[in-house]
């Protein structure tokens, strides 16, 4: 089976390419390298000892996407490509709507043309907004608080409309919680060039001496120690979730939505302490004001993914913080 992976050079995409190749899928990647580097392709080849095809270019470029489908006989698509920084999306909403919608619509139109109707889409727990109760189930009300989140929510709606118009589609929408960690080879991982927005890349930059101090955004939340609680999932577990999703959409038509998390919430302070203990390194931090738009706590009810996808994350928080740090030490 041949899978087109959009955004396959990125953090989650590259790990998913490795799992796909390890499971004997053929892989074709399209990526415009706006948030990744081309050498990731060679690293994936090295890790898996398998070949894959890479098209450097933009998913909004319809001629290119058409050429890929014409040349490659694609059976299914995993669609990761998109811009993902919440703060930037607030400052540049049109950039986010243009890139994330155009790329998705172009992809879907070309998929229709070539009668390829199997899709896995990267959504996010951000579509739940500030949930009233925890853990979060897939049928909770959906609400977003920033343009990035809105692109995910609207694309979910586009995919529902598409399925309603044509029941030949098989679509799995995966709502990721907070992916961290890195591949055990430490050849691929998350390494933002700019000052990171997310907690783990920031901690790693402080631990490796690239940044001076972590700001913990608020210690007056309604959580065990007052700092924000999130559901962190190892990126390799997340990648395996995509294999399960491909297996399901290959068998069943329909559209469905799945939380991919671990079901456990950890506070910022718990993450910092675990990181220090496991990696035997100090992380300087100070408590600052809350970050606007942040919520107290967020963690998944994973029972539906277990039931329907047979997916359960297995890696511990200790493995996650170790792998994040190891990757950064070797690649910064
Ligand atoms: P990433 O930025 O590392 O990977 C995305 C890739 O898409 C990059 O390699 C980028 O160059 C590429 N890309 C962006 N726009 C493109 C375009 N128009 N044409 C071709 N390539 C394009 O991000 P990631 O962390 O791997 O996230 C993958 C997907 O998962 C994204 O859709 C993201 O919104 C979603 N997601 C990520 C997280 C997270 O915390 N990392 C959480 C929830 C959802
Ligand atoms: N956070 C923090 N300092 C940072 C980055 C994040 O204290 O420099 C906190 C943030 O307030 C939240 C948690 O860490 O409680 C996870 O934030 P992240 O941005 O990684 O994920 P998201 O908020 O999107 O779930």
Image (tube, rainbow, N blue to C red):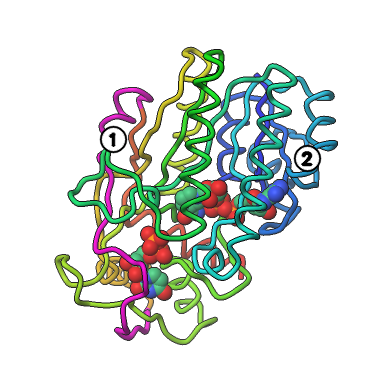
| SS category of the residue bearing label 2 | strand
**173 left or right, relative to 26:** left
Instruction: Name the quarter where the C terminus is drawn.
Output: bottom right
| SS category of the residue bearing label 1 | loop
Identify the residue at horizontal 45%, vertical 24% (top origin).
255
Residue 25 magenta-drawn? no
- Around disc 2, counting alpha carbons within 10 Å, would you say few (fewer than 14), some (14 to 19), or many (20 or more)? some
User: Quadrant of the rendered structure where residue 66 is?
Assistant: top right
Coordinates of residue 240 in the picture (x, y in percent): 47, 35
The answer to whether residue 184 shows anywhere in this view is: no
Q: Is residue 162 above or below residue 121?
A: above
Q: Is residue 14 above or below residue 52?
A: below
Real-space Cα separation, disc 1 to disc 2, in angstroms: 37 Å
Q: Is residue 87 above or below residue 33?
A: below
Disc nearer the start of the sequence (1/2) = 2
Would you say the beta carbon of the disc 2 residue lies within 8 angstroms of ligand 1? Answer: no
**95 left or right, relative to 68:** left
- The foreground one among 247 and 165 is 165
- Around disc 1, counting alpha carbons within 10 Å, would you say few (fewer than 14), some (14 to 19), or many (20 or more)? few
Identify the residue at horizontal 39%, vertical 48% (top origin).
127
Coordinates of residue 123 in the picture (x, y in percent): 47, 43
Q: Which residues are magenta?
A: 282-310
Identify the residue at horizontal 73%, vertical 55% (top origin).
33
Ligand 2 lies in which image quarter?
bottom left
Residue position for label 1: 139
Label the magenta part by its dominant secondary structure: loop
């Amino acid at each position: 089976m041949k899978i087109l992976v959009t955004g396959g050079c990125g953090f989650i995409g590259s790990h998913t390419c490795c799992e796909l190749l390890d499971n004997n899928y053929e892989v074709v990647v399209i990526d415009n390298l706006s948030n990744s580097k081309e050498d990731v392709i060679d690293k994936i080849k090295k890790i898996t000892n398998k070949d894959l095809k890479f098209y450097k270019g933009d998913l909004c470029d319809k001629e290119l996407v058409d050429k890929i489908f014409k040349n490659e006989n694609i059976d299914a698509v995993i669609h990761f490509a998109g811009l993902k920084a919440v703060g930037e999306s607030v400052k540049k909403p049109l950039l986010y709507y243009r890139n994330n919608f155009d790329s998705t619509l172009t992809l879907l139109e070309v998929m229709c043309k070539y009668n390829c109707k199997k899709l896995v889409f990267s959504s996010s727990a951000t579509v739940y907004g500030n949930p009233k109760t925890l853990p979060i189930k897939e049928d909770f009300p959906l609400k977003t608080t920033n343009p990035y989140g809105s692109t995910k929510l609207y694309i979910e709606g586009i995919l529902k409309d598409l399925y309603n118009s044509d029941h030949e589609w098989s679509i799995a929408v995966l709502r990721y919680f907070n992916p961290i960690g890195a591949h055990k080879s430490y050849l691929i991982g998350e390494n933002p060039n700019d000052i990171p927005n997310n907690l783990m890349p920031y901690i790693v930059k402080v631990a490796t001496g690239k940044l001076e101090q972590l700001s913990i955004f608020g210690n007056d939340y309604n959580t065990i120690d007052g700092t924000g609680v999130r559901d962190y999932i190892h990126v390799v577990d997340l990648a395996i979730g995509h294999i399960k999703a491909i297996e399901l959409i290959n068998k069943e038509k329909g559209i469905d939505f799945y939380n991919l998390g671990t079901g456990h919430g950890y506070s910022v302070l718990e993450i910092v302490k675990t990181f220090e203990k496991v990696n035997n390194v100090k992380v300087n931090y100070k408590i600052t004001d809350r970050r606007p738009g942040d919520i107290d706590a967020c963690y998944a009810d994973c029972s539906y993914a277990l039931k329907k996808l047979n997916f359960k994350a297995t890696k511990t928080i200790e493995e996650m913080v170790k792998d994040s740090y190891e990757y950064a030490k070797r690649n910064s």
